[in-house]
């Protein structure tokens, strides 16, 4: 069973700019929650602090009872957190399976040899790339690259998945495939924090949303309510 995520009073400065100011929220295990806000509002910086890619200037990140605030990304991964675009992007000269195997080495359980290969095949099948392990990444279509990115994130067998605009750039039929894949993960109990601009996806997937603007959390609640909140609409229109 996955563990809840709790971030409390997270703070990040870049020189004179406060990119994230005192942001707090919780995700219960198995929830799919949207993290929304106009460009530059601090969403990716929050993901980077959760995943250990950026040190926080203040605040805490907890997974269940464990404080992961000052952990490096590989240790955060061992506590069950994965993200798309984590560590390295797909390497185009390697095969599809090799890319997943590379991510396996960073997982919170380590796999080698035949066991690793079987797990890579399992993750590829889950995302819809069954039997495609020997193909070159450079030849994949866009939706298949997205599938591979997801398989790589799942290779570490996470409990919490951070998706940073993973659905961006998909055409309408591909978008449906992407949404269905996240739904499938949800049905298996995965906790997901979804940074997303595509409102169709947010409505379809997220029971709750958190909205940021200029580094601060400005709204949080059931998606239907939050998306009609005048302060949220104003933040987007002001973008
Ligand atoms: P979002 O993901 O909501 O678009 P970001 O978290 O990427 O927002 O950025 C928040 C703010 O922090 C922006 O003003 C951005 O320019 C700034 N920022 C992000 N990363 C860096 C960095 N590495 N160095 C300096 N400024 C940064």
Image (cartoon, rainbow, N blue to C red):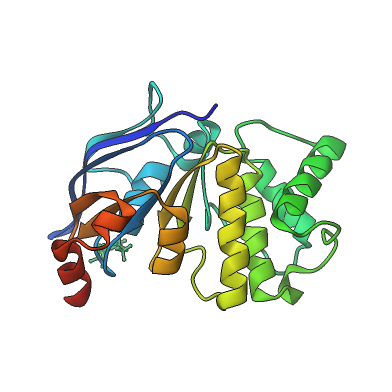
Quadrant containing the C terminus is bottom left
Evaluate whether residue 236 shows in this view: yes
- Using the image as rendered, state which of residue 4 and residue 145 is in the foreground: 4
Q: Is 79 displayed left or right of 6 in the figure?
A: right
- Whether 205 is drawn above or below 237: the answer is above
Q: Is 20 displayed left or right of 204 in the figure?
A: left
**Which residue is pictured at 51% across the width and 30% down the height?**
2
- Using the image as rendered, state which of residue 3 and residue 17 is in the foreground: 3
Q: Quadrant of residue 22?
A: top left
**Which residue is pictured at 23% across the width and 63% down the height?**
228
Image region (quadrant) for ligand 1 = bottom left
Evaluate whether residue 89 shows in this view: no
Quadrant containing the N terminus is top right
**Which residue is pictured at 74% across the width and 59% down the height?**
128
Residue 213 placement (x, y as % from top left): 19, 61
Residue 216 placement (x, y as % from top left): 17, 54
- Using the image as rendered, state which of residue 231 and residue 194 is in the foreground: 231
Residue 148 placement (x, y as % from top left): 67, 60
Q: Is 6 displayed left or right of 57 in the figure?
A: right
Residue 176 placement (x, y as % from top left): 59, 67
Q: Is 134 displayed left or right of 16 in the figure?
A: right
């Amino acid at each position: 069973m996955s563990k809840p995520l709790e971030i409390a009073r997270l703070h990040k400065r870049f020189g004179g700019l406060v990119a994230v100011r005192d942001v707090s929220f919780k995700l219960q295990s198995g929830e799919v929650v949207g993290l929304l806000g106009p460009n530059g509002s601090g969403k990716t910086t929050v993901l980077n602090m959760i995943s250990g890619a950026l040190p926080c200037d203040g605040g805490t990140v907890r997974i269940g009872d464990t404080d992961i605030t000052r952990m490096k990304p590989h240790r955060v991964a061992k506590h069950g957190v994965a993200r798309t675009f984590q560590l390295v992007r797909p390497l185009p000269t390697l095969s599809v399976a090799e890319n997943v195997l590379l991510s396996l080495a960073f997982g919170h359980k380590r796999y080698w040899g035949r066991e690793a290969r079987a797990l890579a095949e399992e993750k590829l099948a889950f995302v819809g790339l069954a039997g495609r392990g020997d193909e070159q990444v450079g030849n994949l279509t866009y939706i298949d690259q997205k599938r591979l990115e997801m398989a790589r994130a799942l290779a570490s067998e996470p409990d919490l998945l951070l998706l940073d605009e993973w659905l961006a750039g998909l055409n309408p039929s591909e978008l449906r495939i992407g949404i269905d894949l996240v739904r499938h993960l949800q049905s298996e109990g995965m906790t997901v924090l979804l940074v997303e601009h595509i409102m169709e996806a947010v409505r379809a997937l997220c029971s709750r949303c958190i909205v940021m603007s200029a580094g601060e959390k400005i709204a949080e609640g059931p998606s239907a309510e939050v998306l009609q909140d005048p302060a949220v609409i104003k933040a987007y229109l002001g973008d």
